[in-house]
Image: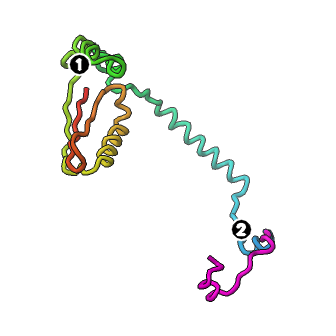
Amino acid sequence: IMNQDEVLRILGATSLCVKPAQFDAKLFQQNNPKPQKNAPKKDQAPKKQEAKKEEAKPAAEAAPKKEKSAPFSSLAPAKLSMDTFKRHYWNDETPVVMKYFDESFVDGDWSIWKVEYKYQSELKRNTTTNNLVKGMFQRLETMKKYAFGLMYVFGETGDQCLAGIWL
């Protein structure tokens, strides 16, 4: 760019650097002085830490940690094992999956839900619809052990329907 006629006419001839710049520590300290910190005295600092430790001990003794129980641990174990069902679903043919489901499903232990997205008119592009579904699954990551769901996007770009089924 520097050797183009318009640039030469306005700026004139330029020359490149002959010697690289050198760091000058004295000049740097003059331009960037360090602020003085008011350091606390050595005698005062340990006393404050000891006081904090003493305050923390009664609080720890007063409130013992409660163990977190797993969600749904209070329910009786269901006949349909979610892990086994998922293993069949992803590895076996449909007749094998349906046979296991029919034998193991007990109404009341599990429920089946059909879901449809409430605001179908907002689904204009495939990418935004897919991002919506991915975001929902990310938020439901903790339910992976206790639920199974499939979501489908039907239709063309601009006219889409988002629906699914959950167990």
Secondary element type, mark 2: loop
Determine whether, in the image, residue 24 is placed left or right of residue 46. right
Determine whether, in the image, residue 65 is placed left or right of residue 165. right
Nearer to the camera, 32 or 113:
113
Q: What residue type is labelled 1?
A: Asp
**30 in the magenta segment:** no
Residue bearing mark 1: 109
Disc 2 packing (10 Å; few <14; some 14–19; many ≥20) = few
Residue 119 visible within the image: no
Nearer to the camera, 145 or 7:
7
Which numbered tag is attached to residue 34? 2
Residue 141 drawn at (x, y percent): 38, 34
Query: Magenta residues: mostly which secondary structure?
Result: loop
The answer to whether 77 is drawn above or below residue 124 in the figure is above
Q: Give the range drawn in magenta.
A: 1-22
Q: Which amino acid does label 2 sit on?
A: Lys
Secondary element type, mark 1: loop
Which tag, 2 or 1, sits closer to the chain's start? 2
Disc 1 packing (10 Å; few <14; some 14–19; many ≥20) = few
Residue 5 drawn at (x, y percent): 62, 84
**Residue displayed at 74% across by 79% down:** 15
Q: Quadrant of the N terminus?
A: bottom right
